[in-house]
């Protein structure tokens, strides 16, 4: 009997569960590298290492990024002291490098070898020490105040050219230099048997699925071809993104601008199980401000609740979705999540472009936009704007395919992620009129959006007293040493023509300099085929409304590069860019066909 679609989905779900269980078992079975090695670390909830530490434990890595304080959920104003022994195999001059934000110092045998102390952004300092073969006392001190946190320790042994991590096998937490291996966890044998059984089941399931796939029983040919084109697009853009990350990772923090604030919310959710930001904020700047201190709403991450709570100013959608990556890989997991979202955005742009173009032109449009300087730059980031762009583009694509419930959900989530994306939800409305059944489609779109925005409104009501009052309307600021509340609606005072000129022609933020493919795409709005005119109208209205909206924004230059605020609108230009490329390809094909006819 032919399996139903539900049966096929059930089998695929079971296969995924089996593979996940097998992977978990194999991960638990993996023997630890250099058991017993590392350094003894002490953690304080102050930046001076004063008083009794909150936690002492052996750590096996001298790298941290937004995840350094293991003693509590407090990732600001803390201190770590690493101590142990460094065992070198031969005598010579060893060079050491500290790459940190904020301060760090390295001592070997009681002598200061590298001094990277003080409050500063990420920077590198080097030093050298003549070491005899054998064991040497090592002490590493690190402290963090506010903002991004980063620490990496590398060395260059005698006769070696490049820097590398200090091998774990050479670090011992014990004073006598003897590293005591930790006992292996019990039950490893049974986990091995379970893992083998899971892998056998997974192999059989894959074999059956492959046979059905060859027989054409897992979907239509067009569905499979679409995924193949998606993978081809990712294969083109991924090396460029990885190159950007690899080069900048060596010397530049990825948590800049608002990114540390979003990271603090992740830490609060996983460490404290709440949204309160007292543990993730330097309290003195608000609780004991100096008479001359001033913190405007652009630099504040605190929204004051009706009962005095310190809630995050920014949306919690990005922290909620990225929390599993942080739990799995620490601070670097946020960078991994950002890359995954950006790759999904490329896929979404290609899918949106297919509403107006064939597979080739749509793929070219997605790749051209994905490789513009704006998106390449933010591959090395942790950005809510990329997530918002993904949700907007996916919502437009779903609306164009008449999947209006999904479109409402996606665009509602995009609005919660970045409030100006409400313009995208409004821009979809022209897709609904002019045809029979528009009331039913409007109900579907509204139902999807209401599910998300209803939760958002209820959360606002609980935190700030009314569904329409958001965190951006109750920003805690300091003016002349006095606490006050500020509203981001008061941040639209820039002269309109100045903002328009800046968004178009500024060398660091203008579209002509940083996103030329999107500028070229604007001509495609006049070349849309009939089937894509309604989705194109929605994308065009959204682009125009977003561009005009930010012309008045005071903090327009707050983006570290280009205009990240326009990212959702620029990503939606995949639709007209696909139409433009399709017209160029079609025109060239007609010319070639005409030439061939004359020659024959």
Image (cartoon, rainbow, N blue to C red):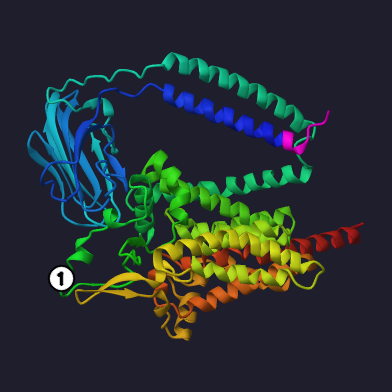
Quarter of the figure with the C terminus = bottom right
* Residue 378 or residue 3, whichever sits in front: 3
Quarter of the figure with the N terminus = top right
* Residue 72 or residue 100, whichever sits in front: 72
Asked if residue 290 lies left or right of residue 248, the reply is left
Residue drawn 54% across the image and 17% down it: 196
Look at the numbered disc 1 and give the secondary structure of its residue: loop
- 130 vs 29: above or below: below
Residue drawn 11% across the image and 47% down it: 50
- 288 vs 208: above or below: below
- 355 vs 195: above or below: below
* Residue 86 or residue 174, whichever sits in front: 174
Residue drawn 74% across the image and 33% down it: 213
Residue 399 position in % (x across, y down): 69, 61
Crowding at mark 1 (Cα within 10 Å: few <14, some 14-19, many 20+): some
Residue 77 position in % (x across, y down): 21, 53
* Residue 474 or residue 355, whichever sits in front: 474
From the image, tell me which residue sits under label 1: 290
Residue 561 position in % (x across, y down): 42, 65
Residue 174 position in % (x across, y down): 16, 25
Regarding residue 455, the answer to whether it shows in the image is: yes
Regarding residue 529, the answer to whether it shows in the image is: no
Magenta segment range?
1-7
- In the rendered image, residue 146 lying in the magenta stretch gets the answer no
């Amino acid at each position: 009997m032919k399996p139903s679609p539900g049966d096929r989905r059930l089998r695929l779900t079971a296969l995924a569960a089996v593979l996940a269980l097998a992977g978990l078992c194999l991960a638990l079975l993996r023997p630890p590298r250099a058991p017993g090695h590392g350094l003894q670390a002490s953690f304080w909830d102050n930046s001076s290492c004063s008083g009794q530490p909150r936690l002492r434990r052996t750590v096996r890595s001298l790298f941290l990024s937004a995840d350094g304080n293991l003693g509590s959920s407090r990732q600001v104003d803390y201190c770590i002291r690493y101590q142990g022994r460094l065992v070198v195999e031969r005598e010579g001059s060893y060079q050491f490098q500290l790459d940190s934000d904020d301060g760090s110092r390295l001592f070997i045998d009681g002598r200061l070898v590298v001094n990277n102390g003080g409050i500063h952004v990420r920077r590198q300092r080097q030093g050298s020490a003549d070491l005899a073969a054998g064991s040497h006392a090592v002490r590493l001190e690190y402290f963090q105040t506010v903002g991004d946190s980063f620490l990496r320790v590398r060395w260059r042994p005698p006769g070696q050219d490049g820097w590398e991590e200090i091998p774990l096998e050479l670090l011992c937490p014990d004073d006598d230099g003897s590293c005591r291996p930790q006992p292996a966890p019990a039950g490893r044998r049974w986990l091995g048997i379970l893992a083998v059984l899971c892998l056998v089941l997974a192999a059989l399931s894959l074999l059956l699925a492959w046979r059905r796939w060859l027989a054409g029983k897992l979907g239509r040919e067009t569905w499979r071809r679409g995924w193949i084109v998606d993978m081809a697009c990712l294969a083109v853009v991924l090396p460029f993104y990885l190159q950007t990350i690899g080069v900048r990772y060596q010397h530049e923090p990825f948590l800049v601008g608002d990114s540390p604030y979003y990271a603090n919310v992740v830490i609060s959710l996983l460490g404290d199980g709440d949204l309160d930001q007292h543990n993730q904020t330097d309290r003195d700047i608000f609780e004991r401000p100096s008479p001359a201190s001033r913190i405007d709403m652009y630099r504040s991450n605190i929204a004051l609740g009706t009962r005095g709570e310190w809630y995050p100013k920014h949306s919690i959608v990005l922290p909620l979705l990225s929390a599993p990556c942080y739990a799995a890989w620490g601070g670097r997991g946020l960078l991994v999540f950002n890359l995954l979202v950006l790759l999904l955005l490329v896929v979404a742009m290609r899918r949106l472009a297919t509403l107006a173009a064939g597979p080739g032109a749509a793929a070219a449009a997605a790749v051209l936009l994905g490789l513009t300087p704006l998106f390449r730059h933010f591959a090395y980031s942790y950005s809510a704007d990329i997530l918002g762009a993904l949700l907007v583009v996916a919502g437009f694509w779903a609306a164009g395919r008449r999947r209006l419930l999904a479109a409402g959900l996606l665009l509602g989530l995009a609005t919660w992620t970045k409030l100006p994306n409400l313009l995208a939800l409004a821009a979809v409305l022209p897709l609904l009129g002019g045809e029979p059944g528009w009331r039913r489609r409007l109900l579907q779109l509204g139902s999807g959006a209401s599910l998300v925005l209803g939760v958002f409104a209820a959360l606002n009501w609980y935190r700030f007293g009314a569904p329409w009052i958001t965190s951006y309307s109750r920003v805690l600021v300091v003016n002349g040493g006095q606490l006050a509340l500020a509203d981001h609606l008061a941040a639209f005072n820039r002269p309109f023509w100045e903002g328009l000129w800046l968004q178009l022609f500024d060398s660091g933020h203008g579209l002509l300099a940083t996103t030329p493919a999107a500028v070229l795409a604007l001509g495609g709005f006049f070349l849309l085929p009939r089937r894509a005119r309604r989705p194109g109208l929605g994308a065009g209205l959204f682009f125009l409304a977003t561009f005009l909206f930010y012309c008045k924004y005071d903090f327009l230059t707050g983006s570290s590069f280009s205009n990240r605020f326009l990212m959702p609108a620029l990503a939606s230009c995949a639709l007209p860019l696909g139409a433009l490329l399709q017209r160029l390809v079609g025109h060239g094909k007609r010319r070639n066909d005409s030439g061939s006819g004359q020659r024959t």
